[in-house]
Image (cartoon, rainbow, N blue to C red):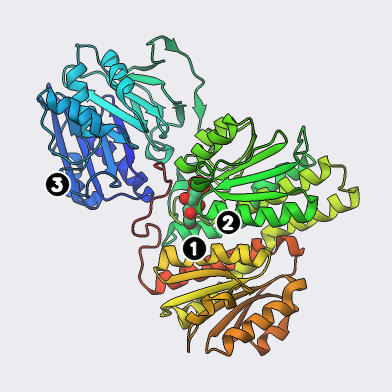
Amino acid sequence: MCGIVGYIGARQAAPILLDGLKKLEYRGYDSAGVAVLNEGAITVKKTKGRLKNLSDMIDGGHKIPGTIGIGHTRWATHGEPSDINSHPHTSESGKIAVVHNGIIENYMKIKEFLTAKGYTFVSETDTEVIAHLADYYYNGNLLETVVKIINKLEGSYALGLISSDHPDQMIAVRKDSPLIIGLGEAENFIASDIPAILKYTRSVYLIEDNEIALLTPNGVTLYNTDLDEISKEVFSVDWDIAAAEKGGYEHFMFKEIMEEPQSVLNTIGPVLRDGLLKLDKVPGRISIVACGSAYHVGIVGKYVIEALTRIPVEVDIASEYRYRNPIITEDTLVVVISQSGETADTIAALREAKKQGAKIFGIVNVVGSSIARESDEVLYTLAGPEIAVATTKAYSTQLTAVYLLALSLKKAMGELSAEEEKYYAEELLRLPDLISAMIEQKDKIQYYASRYFNAKSVFFIGRGLDYALSLEGSLKLKEISYIHSEAYGAGELKHGTISLIEEGTLVIAVATQEKLFEKIVSNIREVKARGAVVLAIATEGCELIEECADGVLYIPKTDPLFTSSPAVTLLQLFAYYVASLKGCDIDKPRNLAKSVTVE
Ligand code: F6R
């Protein structure tokens, strides 16, 4: 979603802002802008479309001199993508400029209030009310002005603000939208995500809700909303800039799939070495909440946890969970899964569960993110930064995290014998190699992609864990290739949807579950009889499937509970090659954003 970068120091700000915004491009945006302060005046340049348009407009930043500035990439919510609606927005006097991520829910009310006071609005955005409020409350002290502004705001925000009256100050504040402060030598930064400033510093403050940062070139002071000074530990980023760059690959998505074996090993290695997770209490019920792909991991989690522990598990889409008045008992463990740790719907679900007394177990990739901080316990997936909008390596590591949770629960129940623990640990440690084996099959996967990339509509079918995986295979394909696709429990298709199957419809049948093999073969025959073309995903040793499918891709044999791991890599690669053959913008699919920080 939207991105924020700010710079204050001795160097020219605009090129640094453009560079930082470029690093945030992956998050999705439709317009970009910067505001730079020089010799007592703020210059704002902003435009609809790609960052390159902005960069060309200001000659890579050289056209607007100044050593303090804020920049923004906007993903439209209130008002269409346009030059006027782009950020930064300024107060009527032009003395204060502001960039904002998030949504101001009460902006209509504030707009009415300010209009009655004589303010004129030029954009359709919610953000413009902040710029005018800044003018309305301004008393010569920027910090005090910001406190008054945020007292008035309802909703979510990460804000960066500069004023031509204060050429050595920048203010940043957040609520329910990510924001970090980068600490440099005689220069400081604000950003909505680490990659934006990693080139300049690894030392950051992870700002929490209602913390206000006052940046000068020589230091950063943090305050609470009473303007008492607060202290905070400096967080040192331990991953490299190379991890956030393409490193010779054509797309981040492909690079990230290639990184899956290592990411999975990084995630399971330490937990297995320590003899699984130490859980202080065995829950009576488990509720998993997440969005999108992370939700699909949750469905795999349901199958695996219930199979291993017999603890009942329910899985909810986070945006539904919070409004359905969920039943949370004393012994409910709520498992929250999120790559970014900043997904607004997931955070809201977490808070709802916490309010009702649930204990929260977070499975999170981004260290120090909101979900990580607000969970009672966290299992980090060590996938490293994921840049492509479509998740791949994070999904793979989340899968292994739920396997580890299931085994840890079984152990805490006293039901995991030493032999079983050894067996499962060995099976888990084989997964990186099995995933590598899938990657080695990439030419064959590409071949099938080239046969089917013209499909107009695709159905993924599977049973049990293969159904859970079908949901992810289908999402991956549709989000990056724009081919309409749906996933069904293979036995469910005949209850209506089978009427859509006609001559040549592509059906991808996932058939890795040995005990359900006969069943899915019958379902394949059903769709074949209606003209479907079937590409099957099966386990080595199940060659019988070749008798009914038009094409088969095999995954290596593993414990039936863990087949989703190699199989998802296969489906990710299939989606990747299809999108590539269709010439799609693979890393930045239309309409999508990397982390969805608005409800
Ligand atoms: C799809 C995808 C999304 C995310 C979802 C949750 O490829 O990436 O469906 O899985 O938006 O995001 P996180 O995991 O950051 O909470």
Q: Nearer the viewer, mark 2 or mark 3?
A: 2
Three-letter residue code for mark 3: Met
In the rendered structure, which disc, 1 or 2, sits on the residue that comes first in sequence? Answer: 2
Relative side of 107 to 512, left or right: left
Q: Which residue is disc 2 drawn over? A: 296
Q: Which residue is disc 1 drawn over? A: 475
User: For this rendering, which residue is in front, 371 or 48?
Assistant: 371
| Residue 523 horizontal/vertical position (percent) | 64, 80
Three-letter residue code for mark 2: His
Q: Which residue is disc 3 drawn over? A: 57
User: For this rendering, which residue is in front, 301 or 277?
Assistant: 301
Residue 553: image quadrant is bottom right
Q: Secondary structure at mark 1?
A: helix
In the rendered structure, which disc, 2 or 3, sits on the residue that comes first in sequence? Answer: 3
Relative side of 551 to 586, left or right: right
User: Residue sitting at 28 percent across and 24 percent down?
Assistant: 9
Neighbor class of circle 1 (other Cα within 10 Å; few <14, some 14-19, many 20+) is many
Q: Against 144, is 320 above or below?
A: below
Spatial distance from mark 2 to mark 3, Cα to Cα? 43 Å
The verdict on label 1 being within 8 Å of ligand 1 is yes
Three-letter residue code for mark 1: Leu
